[in-house]
Image (cartoon, rainbow, N blue to C red):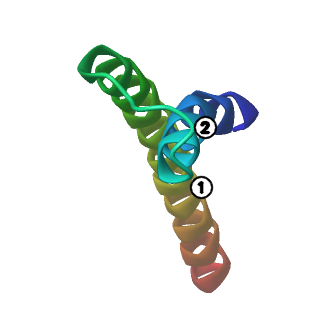
Amino acid sequence: MMVSLLLIVPLVIDGGWQYVKKRESTNNRRLVTGILAGIGTDFILYNIVVLGIAHGRAVVQHLIS
């Protein structure tokens, strides 16, 4: 999960610096940070789905027994 958050950090830094007008972002930088953030977000969503499925199975097993 920590790796997923670390993949999103470059996007936050780039967007934050551009927001405070310290530096203008380039298309290449936006592409790279966007791809990294997308991968990080996918990992986070995957973990949420896997945990949800595991929790659902545990609930069903509890109700059956």
Q: Is residue 2 left or right of residue 5?
A: right
Please state the horizontal and vertical placement of residue 12, each as a whole percent of the image.
56, 43
- Residue extending farthest to the right is 2
Q: Amino acid at mark 1?
A: Leu
* Foreground pick, 22 / 63: 22
* Secondary structure type for disc 1: helix
Q: Eyeballing the image, is 59 above or below 14?
A: below
- Most distant residue in the bottom direction: 63
At horizontal 51% and vertical 46% (from top left) the residue drawn is: 21
Which labelled disc corresponds to residue 13?
2
- Is 58 on the left-hand or right-hand side of 15? right
| Disc sitting over residue 51 in the figure | 1
Classify mark 1: residues with Cα within 10 Å, few (<14), some (14-19) or many (20+).
Answer: few
| Mark 2 surroundings within 10 Å by alpha-carbon count, few (fewer than 14), some (14 through 19), many (20 or more) | few
Q: Is residue 28 above or below residue 25?
A: above
Q: Position of residue 60 (x, y in %)?
A: 54, 75
Q: Position of residue 35 (x, y in %)?
A: 35, 25
Quadrant holding the C terminus:
bottom right
Pick whichever, 18 or 37, lies toward us. 18
The residue lying at 43 percent from left, 26 percent from top is 33
Q: Which residue lies at the image location 54% right of the left edge and 55% below the top edge?
A: 48
Is residue 40 depicted above or below 28 in this figure?
below
Q: Nearer the viewer, residue 12 or 44?
A: 12
Image x and y of residue 16, in percent: 57, 47
Looking at the picture, does residue 3 appear above or below residue 5? above
Mark 2 vs 1, N-terminal side: 2
